[in-house]
Image (tube, grey):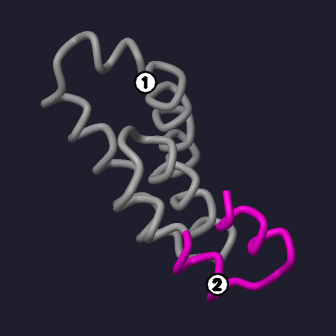
Amino acid sequence: MLARAAEGLGEAATAEQNYKNAILNFPGPEAKHRYAHFLWNQNRFGESKELLEQILAEAKRQPPHARRLNKYWLDQTRDALKSFG
């Protein structure tokens, strides 16, 4: 993913734009979860938490087969939210 590469190179603005593009173009929670992790690393905790909560809210509206398909990322999202206390 381009966003992760830019993040690894320390190009935060490019990484953020690429994460936003990925969210628009890829189904499922992975891109949003990775963007939330990026936001956390940028000390943007409120935005990170909001995005993680959004992932779980969207998952509640999905059919069971979609939740099963995305189980790994939904579990990761729940775990990440625990860090907020």
**Inter-mark Cα distance, 2 to 1:** 27 Å
Secondary structure under tag 1 reads loop
Q: Quadrant of the N terminus?
A: bottom right
The residue lying toward the viewer, choosing from 50 and 21, is 21
Does the segment drawn in magenta span residue 16? yes
Question: Where residue 20 sits: x, y (%)?
Answer: 44, 71
Q: Dot 1 corresponds to which residue?
A: 70
Q: Amino acid at mark 2?
A: Thr
Q: Amino acid at mark 1?
A: Asn
Q: Dot 2 corresponds to which residue?
A: 14
The residue lying toward the viewer, choosing from 59 and 28, is 28
At horizontal 40% and vertical 59% (from top left) the residue drawn is 23
Sequence-wise, the earlier of marks 2 and 1 is 2
Find the magenta span and give its range. Answer: 1-18
Q: Image check: 14 left or right of 77?
A: right
Q: Image check: 35 left or right of 20?
A: right
Q: Quadrant of residue 66?
A: top left
Answer whether labels 2 and 1 touch (C-beta < 8 Å).
no
